[in-house]
Image (cartoon, grey):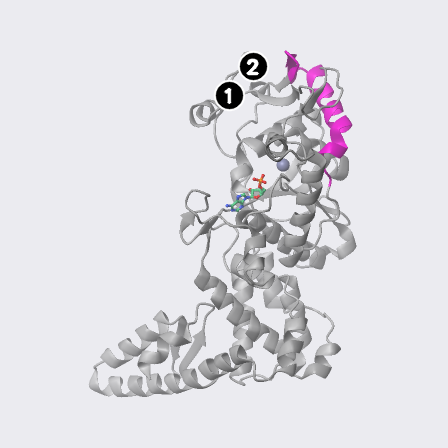
């Protein structure tokens, strides 16, 4: 069985992944608050954890993985949106939930096995809060129920901060009903115009954090394998989830491996409405950017690195994807029809098993496509492996490939074939010749100049006794080689 290693935020180490029960590998990922379209950043955890889900299904079998991602459908931002627009809350949350599902499907994300909505789990949240009060971990005051943070000694371990540092750094709300400013809300009172449920503390609604603790317990149990989300959720949301769950179910461990994706930026800047660089997934899809391109750009950066969305990357991704589709269609439409997934390339699986190294997996597949273009290796026999490897990353390019197979004059492909298929071998020859000459004259300036230009164009230059090999990387830009002609 393939061995997966994952970076666990809890231990700050890459660890071998060993599920509690290989017959039921369990993962929980914090989902969206449904009051508006998902912005591009919201899609990053969806795509990242979708790849992990696919990998777990590959390693343990599709029937042996349970993936839960929630919808937060009770929240003050939703209440505010209803007030602004005069629309009923249920209508807003139902519409936004469907938008989210449609947009994420366009990015090739599989639906999780369970997608619980917070409002469906209010009785379970109330029961959990009652237990916390009974055991002294929570208290009621003025219709509010608060968690006593100082009662849980592990608080702050995940994000590596002490409670006092957190008080100094965070904007913790001081309120008359709190024993300590760090205490957080489990339940709060609702006025008649706001959503509310009857509870032992009067009519009210849950605080945000309790829903994930209650839903993960109901659907995955007191101990499960993986908990994921963006790193902006580490504190306070995930610290609070841990505190609630570990105090309510001390016999369990709650989540054993914590995975956090880094944030997405746009053209090097934080995405924000005031900078005018804020856009939704839907905006991009509407502009004609295919979902696969968005996905490709996301996966070309490792999930633990900040990722920068740029137009240039989107353009390059679309070129590469055409090429990848071309790999599938190269044996003609007939064979394409009968294409079925088989075993993915072991190198691709290995890269993903290494803390989800999607960047390396993409490079491996990219190299394959270039080998094919150079005609170095006949890929006819490997199409099914390539197809399965693309699927592991969530790209099903059969439709694109059939379009390409029908229209062999498709200019994108031609351009790439021209650029990659003819120009680079010539340049490799030129470089080998220059190197030969330089060995005599001891003047390496031409070699250095050629090499620098190739590297600048995104080409990896490999020089050995056997000769020169030029391997275009994912950032390869044929236009930059113009000057060398
Ligand atoms: P929210 O609806 O704000 O609770 O966010 C839903 C998910 O999107 C969470 O997992 C966040 O961590 C994630 N998220 C929000 N903004 C970004 C961003 N700019 N980059 C990556 N992930 C983000
Ligand atoms: Zn959560």
Q: Residue at x 64, y 23 (%)?
A: 186
Residue 318 spot, x, y in % from top left = 53, 68
Residue 451 spot, x, y in % from top left = 32, 76
Residue 443 placement, left or right of 368: left
Quarter occupied by the C terminus: bottom left
**In this orientation, which residue lies closer to the viewer: 173 or 133?**
173
Q: Residue at x 49, y 46 (%)?
A: 263
Residue at disc 2, secondary structure: loop
- The answer to whether the residue bearing label 2 lies less than 8 angstroms from the nearest atom of ligand 2 is no
Circle 2 crowding by C-alpha within 10 Å: few under 14, some 14–19, many from 20: many
Q: Which residue is mark 2?
A: 178
The reply to whether discs 1 and 2 touch (Cβ–Cβ < 8 Å) is: yes
Q: Which residue is mark 1?
A: 173
- Residue 309 magenta-highlighted: no
Highlighted magenta segment, given as a residue range:
116-144
- Residue 126 magenta-highlighted: yes
Residue 433 spot, x, y in % from top left = 32, 88
Query: Would you say residue 444 is visible in this rendering?
Result: no
* Tally of marks: 2
- In the image, residue 102 sits, relative to residue 80, either above or below, namely below
Q: Residue at x 25, y 81 (%)?
A: 446
Residue at disc 1, secondary structure: loop
Residue 305 spot, x, y in % from top left = 47, 51
**In this orientation, which residue lies closer to the viewer: 143 or 384?**
143
Circle 1 crowding by C-alpha within 10 Å: few under 14, some 14–19, many from 20: few
């Amino acid at each position: 069985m393939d061995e997966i290693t994952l970076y666990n935020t809890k231990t700050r180490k890459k660890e071998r992944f060993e599920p509690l029960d290989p017959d039921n590998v369990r993962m929980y990922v914090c989902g969206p608050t449904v009051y508006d379209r998902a912005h591009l950043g919201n899609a990053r955890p969806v795509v990242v954890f979708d790849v992990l889900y696919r990998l777990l299904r590959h390693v343990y079998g599709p029937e042996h993985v349970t993936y839960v991602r929630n919808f937060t459908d009770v929240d003050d931002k939703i209440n505010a949106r209803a007030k602004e627009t005069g629309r009923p809350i249920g209508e807003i949350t139902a519409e936004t939930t469907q938008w989210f599902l449609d947009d994420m499907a366009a990015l090739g994300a599989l639906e999780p096995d369970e997608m619980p909505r917070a409002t469906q789990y209010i009785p379970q949240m109330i029961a959990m809060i009652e237990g916390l009060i009974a055991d002294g971990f929570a208290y009621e005051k003025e219709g509010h129920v608060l968690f006593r943070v100082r009662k849980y000694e592990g608080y702050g371990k995940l994000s590596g901060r002490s409670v006092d540092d957190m008080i100094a750094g965070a904007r913790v709300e001081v309120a008359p009903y709190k024993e300590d400013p760090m205490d957080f809300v489990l339940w709060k009172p609702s006025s008649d115009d706001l959503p509310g449920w009857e509870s032992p503390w009067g009519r009210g609604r849950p605080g945000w954090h309790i829903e994930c603790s209650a839903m993960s317990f109901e659907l995955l149990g007191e101990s499960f394998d993986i908990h994921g989300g963006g790193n902006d959720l580490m504190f306070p949301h995930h610290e609070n989830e841990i505190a609630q769950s570990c105090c309510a179910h001390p016999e369990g461990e709650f989540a054993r491996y914590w995975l956090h994706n880094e944030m997405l930026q746009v053209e090097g800047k934080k995405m924000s409405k005031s900078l005018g660089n804020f856009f939704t997934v839907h905006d991009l899809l509407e502009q004609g950017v295919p979902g696969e391109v968005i996905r490709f750009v996301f996966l070309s950066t490792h999930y633990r690195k900040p990722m920068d969305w740029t137009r240039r990357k989107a353009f390059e991704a679309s070129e590469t994807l055409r090429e990848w589709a071309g790999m599938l269609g190269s044996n003609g439409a007939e064979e394409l029809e009968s294409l079925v997934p088989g075993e993915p390339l072991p190198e691709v699986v290995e890269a993903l098993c290494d803390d989800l190294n999607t960047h390396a997996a993409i490079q491996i597949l990219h190299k394959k496509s270039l080998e094919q273009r150079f005609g170095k290796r006949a890929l006819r026999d490997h199409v099914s492996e390539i197809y399965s490897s693309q699927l592991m990353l969530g790209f099903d390019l059969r439709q694109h490939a059939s379009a390409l197979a029908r229209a062999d004059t498709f200019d994108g492909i031609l351009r790439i074939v021209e650029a990659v298929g003819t120009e680079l071998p010539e340049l490799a020859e030129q470089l080998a010749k220059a190197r030969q000459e330089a060995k005599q004259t001891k003047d390496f300036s031409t070699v250095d100049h050629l090499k620098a230009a190739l590297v600048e164009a995104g080409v990896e230059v490999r020089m050995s006794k056997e000769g020169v090999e030029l391997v275009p990387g994912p950032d390869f830009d044929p236009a930059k080689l113009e000057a060398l002609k």
